[in-house]
Amino acid sequence: MAPFPLDLFKTLGPWAYLYFLAVGFAFGYILEISGFTESPILAAQFYLKDFRVLKVMFGAIVTASILIFSAVQLGLLDYNAIWVNLTYLWPMVLGGFIMGIGFILGGFCPGTSMVAAASGRIDGVFFALGVVFGVGLFGFLEPRFQNFWFDSYYGRLTLFDLFHTTPGVIVFLVVLMALVAFALGEVAERHFGRKTERKPAWRYAAGGIALLAGLVLAFTSPRTPMEKWERMAPQMQPLLTERKVYVHPGEVLDTLANDKLRTVLIDVRSERDYNLFHLKGAWHVPLEEIPAVIPKLLDMTNAPNVVIIVMSNDEALATQAWKMLVASNVPNVYILEGGINHWLDYFAEEDGEAIQPLQVPAGAQEVLRWDFEYALGDGYKAAFPEAHKYQGKIPYTPKIELKLKRGPTSGGCG
Amino acid sequence: MTVHEQALARPKTQAQAKTQAQSKAKPYVNGYLGGILLGLLLFLTFFLSGNGLGASGGVNHLLAWVLDLIAPRFVETHPYWARYAGGTLRAWDNWVVFMVFGLLIGGFVSSKIHGRWQVATNKGPKLSARTRWLLAFLGGTLMGYGARLARGCTSGQALSGGAVLAAGSWAFMLALFAGAYLFAYFFRDLWN
């Protein structure tokens, strides 16, 4: 498992507050030395006179994304354990647009206005007070716009998932876009700008390094979930060999009936088997599609009461899926013990004649050992047995233990 | 002299102080260098704690905390505020609050070290200080409102979300620049 990020509040205890204070200090310091306390400089961005805002913002994004995805590629940083802003498309677009108007009207953004206020700028003080007022206003009006505020939700959507490519390719494109924007900005500064600062020659070298790093990232393929598993197998394999994550059908039934838990069932079998019979509410995700649903599962498991149970006809395929999910930082994943076949050992009787045992060749793996009258999917009673009927009648050793997800479950904006 | 007149007189007296202060003030660093430094910090925060930077979230938490102090019943009955300060939740007990305090201290220290600390109102040449204050407040209001609507400001959304390639953060960033460029023309007299 990638050693970073750390769970700072666990490792540092209350000292973590000091860490965040220090980060904030550096943040304020850098904004101040970059000149972000001077509103006319910030506003000049939008009259094409001074591209400081673009240089600092885009420069920071390029630098950080190259380093972040390089660290991920080197196996030092777990991308799935860092906070990626969730996408609520239209609220974000409208909010961004409103902020753009606020920017050109007021000459700051919230962070820079605080730094400006701290360095004595009265316009910064008024702007910061306005921010407090605006935040409050939103809080008071939120009940009226709640539907919109939660509209167009896409969860943990990234640019590379959106365009079906690798993070490296996107980083490369971002670098390219930034360099073009910087070049155009410098042209504009020469035309419209007042006396602008002397531009250092090292910026060409920095641009070259960024481009090269972007290219390298674009041509390296990211680790697949299975490759990640191989790296962490030595520590995690005991969970499988000691059967700590194989959950008895009886416990699955009780878990489903537990209102305090949200149980996500993932069925990795073939479409044919899924159509014949599956547990009620089970989500059909064939093994090869597991990597694609990982962002969704990471998003769901921000809530601390989610249990994920993967299942196949026996255990082999479900175990593969378990490995991929666990290696991808999805918490609280378990496997249905003995698979659907074992589930039906207990619950097939619910449907009488309609579900019959089937003779399969000895040693056959991942084959459905049951015969169904019709392909009813979850239309059988065995797909959702009533838990109270079985209360205490199926003995099992409880294995499900809820653990908190590694990494932050909210951003700086929640 | 009333307080109001004193407030208006302040920029005048500062105008003299300004020339004095400016001679001592060190120039700002190059924009590219600022960007690289900010990028290094952003990377470091993601690498160590898994979180990026934030500012407006801290304002929100602090506001919820103050509301909880003066009107706890109101907070309990309004889901938006209860989310931050309801029940036993301590709204100040969040990393972004500490980041905001650090931000203020860092800005103060840097401006003092570099001789740039100065009580002054920056504005376009055509504006009076009073109009500038009013517009700054209005702009701040739009920014604060928009930041909550978009679930993050330039730091938490554009910088942090942008660096980890969050799709919504990039849409946000484009919308912000679009808004500012579109309205720049109408507000040109404020700055030029």
Image (cartoon, grey):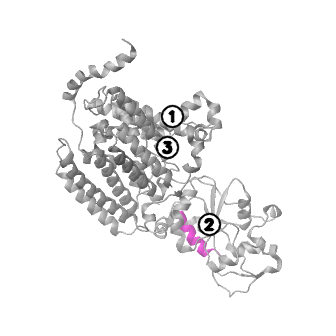
Residue at position x 33%, y 44% from top?
B184
Q: Are marks 3 and 2 in contact (CB under 8 Å)?
A: no
Find the magenta span and give its range: A314-326
Residue at position x 35%, y 16% from top?
B6
CA gap, disc 3 and disc 1: 14 Å
Marks 3, 1 in one chain: yes
Disc on res. B148: 3
The subunit carrying tag 2 is A
Residue furthest toward the top? B1
A408 or A285, nearer to the observer: A285
Report helix, strand or loop for mark 1: helix
10 Å neighbourhood of mark 1: few (<14), some, or many (≥20)? Answer: many
Residue at position x 63%, y 55% from top?
A402
Most frequent secondary structure within the magenta stretch: helix
Which percent across, then down, holds residue B63?
A: 52, 34
Three-letter code for the amino acid on which mark 1 is drawn: Leu
Using residue A348 as the reference point, say whether residue A17 is left or right of it: left
Q: Which residue is mark 2?
A: A242
Three-letter code for the amino acid on which mark 2 is drawn: Glu
The subunit carrying tag 3 is B
Residue furthest toward the bottom? A361
Q: Are marks 1 and 2 in contact (CB under 8 Å)?
A: no
- In the depicted structure, whether residue B74 falls above or below residue A64: above
Marks 3, 2 in one chain: no
